[in-house]
Image (tube, rainbow, N blue to C red):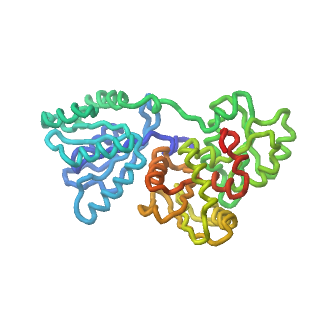
Amino acid sequence: MLKTPKSLRTQIGIFGRRNAGKSTLLNALTRQDVSIVSNVPGTTTDPVEKAMEMLPLGPVLFIDTAGIDDSGALGGKRIEKTRKIFERADIALIVATPDEWGDFETALIEEFKQRGTPLLVVINKRDLANPAPATLEYLEKHNIPFVTIAAVNPDDLPRFRDKLLDILPDSFFTNPTILGDLVPPGEYAVLVVPIDLEAPKGRLIMPQVQSIRDILDNDSYCVVVKERELRDAIENMKRPPALVVTDSQAFLKVAADTPDNIPMTSFSILFARFKGDLATFVEGAKAIENLEPGDRILVAEACSHHPIGEDIGRVKIPRWLTQYVGGELQFDTVQGHDFPDNLEQYKLVVHCGSCTFNSKALMSRITRCRELNVPITNYGVAIAYSLGIFERALEPFGMK
């Protein structure tokens, strides 16, 4: 509750061969023994994460990974976990040693270039040797930013930090808004928060909390109610709210109780814009119209939880889509960072609001779906479409 969640931190992945000094770099940056350091290749197995503040960038999450050159059956599994970090790394640090540069490093560079991920090559262990002239020539010829350091030397870290900040575009230093552009300063937003079995005891869920904070940051007012109290709350306000935001599960009741002259949408749709690409999700939802009985749908959840009762992803959305199509559909569900390689078998991907994902992770999935021509939408947009309030829910964004 007191710390910035991972999903809002700039995630910096540390990649490279075994024994290039990735873990030493992480420990040096955090000034803690976060990762085990050893001369034995393959010491780092699962990704190691460490959150910290890095001004002026703000809250960041460093992720140490296994060597991309690992070998054997177990090494292959380590590489697979490392590659999953590719999808959510906002920044890539490619660590190499002065005397070892080749296909592994150039392949990493090309991978992150294709993903549009800012990268910095860190030539480590300069205390042991100077970088090979051929390596420096390659980096300079291809305009690849690099810095030469000894991670064991604290005096080298300020130079590394300055170089890292220097390669980042201005967008890394700005804070996008969730709904600040929809609720002017001094105006009201009404947030409808159902309290059901899946609501955390004593707490609100992350999108609700983050929306409240965003409203306060934009000098606007916030009224929080349950769905049963919405109508009374609006009637007792001296002026209409600028926006009503609801949990998608209560869409129909909230739409009925919100006057037509008051814009209305859902937390999930707000997060579709905040974390992903709302226009792509809107087009994806239109694919619902072409679904036929027997089609296979993938439901992707960013967080891991035990389904309770009328679970939104496993029960309610399948029910609403089945009713809309008028026949049985086949649903598969994945959680966390699991995402299938064989997306071509699906007629539609329905993603959650991604409150526990950073934007990079969600955009990586959107990009994969685009490349394979598989429609992707999210919970709120899909629910609005299947319940017949699609245009009403998109009106605040000037979309249909």
The spot of residue 170 in percent (x, y) is 45, 28
Q: Residue at x 41, y 61 (%)?
A: 341
Does residue 235 appear to the left or right of 124 in the view shown?
A: right
The spot of residue 367 in percent (x, y) is 45, 49
Q: Nearer the viewer, residue 150 or 274?
A: 274
The spot of residue 45 in percent (x, y) is 31, 56
The spot of residue 190 in percent (x, y) is 74, 41
Residue 221, by quadrant, is top right
Q: Residue at x 53, y 50 (%)?
A: 356
Q: Nearer the viewer, residue 212 or 2?
A: 212
Question: Relative to residue 156, is residue 70 depicted above or below?
Answer: below
Q: Is residue 148 visible?
A: no
Q: Residue at x 65, y 47 (%)?
A: 267
Does residue 280 appear to the left or right of 61 in the view shown?
A: right
Does residue 251 appear to the left or right of 75 in the view shown?
A: right
Q: Which quarter shows the N terminus?
A: top right
Does residue 69 appear to the left or right of 115 in the view shown?
A: left
Q: Is residue 280 visible?
A: yes
Question: Relative to residue 331, is residue 160 depicted above or below?
Answer: above
Q: Residue at x 40, y 44 (%)?
A: 89
Q: Nearer the viewer, residue 189 or 330?
A: 330
